[in-house]
Amino acid sequence: MNITVHHNSRKRNHLSFSTLSPLIPKLLKRLLVLMPEPTSAEDILLTCEASGNPPPNFRWTKDGEEFIPSNEPGLSVSLGSGTFMKTGVVSGPMSQYKGKYSCYADNALGTAVSNEVQLITETEGEKKVEEGESVVLKCNPPISTVPPVIHWMDERMHHIELNDRVTQGRDGNLYFSHVTINDTRIDYTCNVQYLNARTILSKEPITLTVTTSNSVVRSRRPQMMRPSGTHSTYHALRGQSLELECIVQGLPTPTVKWVRKDGQLSESRTSRHLSDRLLRISNISVSDGGEYQCSVNNSQGKVTHTYTVSVEAAPYWTKEPVSQLYAPGETVRLDCQADGIPSPAVAWSINGKPITSIDSNPRRTVRDGALILRDVVFTDTAVYQCQAHNKHGTILVNTYIFVIELPPQILNADGQKYNSTEGQNAVLQCQTFGSPRPKVTWERNSSASLLAEPRVNLLTNGNLQITNVSHGDEGLYTCSVSNTNLSINADLDVLNRTVILSPPGSLRVQPGKTAIFTCLAQVDPKLTPPHIQWKRSGQELFQSYAEDKYTFEGPDLIVANVQTEDEGVYTCEVITNLDRVEASGSIIVVDRPDPPTQLQVSDPKDRNVTLSWTAGDNHNSPVIEFVVEFEDGDSKERGWEELKRVSGTNESVTVSLQPYVSYRFRVISINNIGKSDPSMPSDLHSTPPQAPDNNPENVRSESTDPDTLVITWEEMDRRVFNGPEFHYKVFWRRVVGDTTWYSNVSTEPPYIVTEVGNFSAFQIKVQAANQKGEGPELDPVTGYSGEEIPLEAPKNVGIVLLNSSAIRVTWEPVNEKTVRGHLLGYKIHLTRFGSRGHHQGRRAREPETSVEVETGPKEEKRVLGGLRPYSHYALTVTVFNSKGEGPPSKTLSFETDEGAPGPPMSLLLDSHAGTEMTLHWTPPAQPNGVLKGYLLQYQSGYLTTPLPLNWLSLIRRGSWTLTAATRFYLRGRTSAGDGEPITREGATTLDGAPPSNISLSVGEKSVNMSWVPGQRQRSVGFQVQYLNKQCTYELCVCMWLCLCHCRDTGVLASRSSTSTRTYTTS
């Protein structure tokens, strides 16, 4: 019996037996197998198969003891063999199956024994750490030629969330920068997936227990977890990808920043993953070799790690030989250059045979990788191979050389038209065929100096290249083959280059808003209409009709509902059939800042405390300032109040506090977009009590009642009480007499002292006090007890008449002791009893009007104006204080002199004829004396040219013959002079104007007419004419003096001045 052992790389261990003959079996070699700790079906599979005659029986031993798989829950044995596997749920941990196994197969002829197989289980078991420590959960996947894909999951196959604090390394391990209580769980499971083998291995779950520290969790400086130390070296091949890890521990969670120490990181080929813990360089090139650095920071410090990257390369061509036709006698040069790291070796072969193994030929030489053939003959026609190789690989290129004789030809058509735009390179084609190779010349306008221009080059294939073309290069070019009559013409037209006039800008956009890029270009009209292609970070954008994310409207790109993922560089590319230009802008999403975090209260003192915090994400808009707010724990109804503002560059501040106040603090960040939400509030911080710092303000007396002293003040804010048992100490003493200080205690204003006399002067003061002491010493203020009304009237009151409407009143000041209060001033009471022109037989004069005038306390005279001339008056003077007025002085009566009268109350004009005007008026309401007559003034022709006033004195009324429009001025006259005029304008009927605004209201048998009379139409009649035209009435209105000729008319006349009439017709 032969026994063989098979090891399956797909995590199975096979012990196989095959029977050749009924012989005593041989022992198998010992096999050591490393098994990952499994949790799924097929995780344990030990194969033991044998055949024999008679059929063998199977049994197992584990660590030298009998082991019966069928007796183990979760294990099953295959029929006809000794193979057993895990097919169900086992009882207990998988580590119970750890040990050395042997399989025995026996029959009547003997027993075969397998090599010993060792089953090893690896387990992290249970990890127990304190909150804030760093932890690594190891995976240790089995070694494989194909790197596996590793996932950390829980027992429900949900992925463990990865972030800047929890990171999975390239080694498969799970790294915790620091742990929190929420990291505690019993089912951290590493799942290893081998894609090619279509196999998934699952390790036994790891239990992680995080305990709460008895002390405050201390912050820790960052430290490298993977890679360790400060420097590491990496090797990469050109064209492959390289991943650099920077996994760190620290509290608070550190931030990671990548830089290239000897240059700039490639934006297109580098990307960051796993919260910046992994830097991937794609399609790596030789220029990517150098030093990279990850810089790790948190509030406790900084650490860096330097990565030295060396790049090697398999061979690649820098210059390849070109297949070509040659004529006999020409020289062939095949350039073959390759590069790589290390530098590759270059070798030539002819028709597959190394050139070194072919007989040497003096016409054939190899120099610096180039193969040179001189004076070629027809037998040199062959395939030439160039091969380059180094330790990373080999490359080969075939080149075909044909030695032949052919007549020359120009392969391009004559009269070809070429278009190009300014600044581009233009290539005019003139490819030839022939052997020997035809010699080509180019001319422009028969100029042989064309190639002297440095921008013009004749290419080896006969084409003419003009770099950086301009409008001056336009025209006809001629290509000719030397020593022949072969030639063609080429016409070059240079168009204006496409220019972007309005490129997209750099936009700062708030989330949810719309961003609009504009890309306005100027295109030569001969070019095809341009196409605008928009790109974001190098990727083409397409209009999204479903989500309306991107909308293209002419030259505009509209990005709707901008979010953080929309940030990037946006490029517009204007494409025509000849050129393309591009310009770029960007979107930066800005928003109000996140709230500050980690607010801490430190260094507490009696009167101040230090606050520190960590600013939240500013969302691309720098923080301008921080606002520190506080809440009084004993006055929560007042809400949060601003305490101090701090520059946005600071993250700590010392704030002054008031004694005996319970503070809770929070911080708000402000940037140009707005305010953040508040930070989490701090714990309550209480300051110790102290004596008051200040006393109440505005201490004063507000005594209103006699014989009382009312002391009051502004109540102090509870927040400045500075301690418990706060109260006010009130002090008072007389200014004159008993000057002893008296005091008492009050909890609020006012404080009232009684039986102190009327208007007595006191010195008063109020001092704040609490359990810890009193406020500072203070100076007293003077106050008075309540006032009483004055006792005496002013004496020696006199009156001087200044004119008919003004007087001067004088008096002597009263004794201040009789005022019995603060002297506020004097009051003059003036009463008018009517005009002096009343009938003398009246028994009494009724008071008509009264006036009260107040003066200052220091005044002893006052001029009163606005009196009515020719009137009876009475006058008294009193003194007053805040309590009221004293008795009046003796009444003085006086009369004012005559004055000029007021204007007449009315003036009416009446004209009954074309040459007559009658005036009617009524006397002035205020004659101000005895009327002696009237003064009438008139002014003619005022409607055109003003005329001098004519004067006419009248006694009562008059009439004149007037020939033009006139303005009248009528004044009353007394012995004091002429008064104010009343003015009216008038004219005789002779100068009237026709009516206007004529309107009709037609009924069944009547017509109602209305109109507006013209100026100066008084006592005027109107004539209405009508004409019957087939039951339609045409009406016209004119003045009485107006003639209206109409045939077959009936006339209705009215001599009234009324401007509305109703006419009935039949």
Image (spheres, helix red, strand yellow):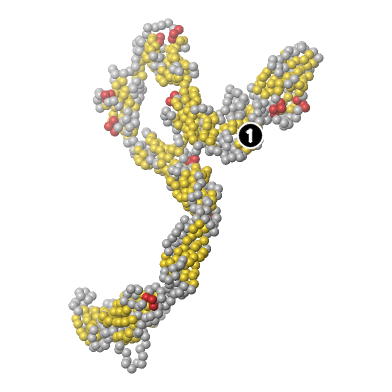
- 881 lies above or below 23: below
- Three-letter code for the amino acid on which mark 1 is drawn: Lys
Q: Position of residue 827 (x, y in %)?
A: 36, 78
From the top left corner, tell me how far across and down residue 918 is, in percent.
25, 85
Give above or below for 89 relative to 703. above
**Residue 66 found in image quarter:** top right
Q: As rendered, which of 974 and 595 lies closer to the eye?
A: 595
Q: Is residue 676 visible?
A: no
> Image quarter for residue 98?
top right
* Quadrant into which the C terminus falls: bottom left
Q: Is residue 945 above or below residue 517?
A: below
Residue found at x 27% / y 86%: 929
Image coordinates for residue 871, horizontal then vertical, percent: 31, 85
Which of 836 and 579 lies nearest the eye of the viewer? 836
Total labels drawn? 1
Q: Give left or right: position of 107 versus 964.
A: right
Residue 506 in view here = yes
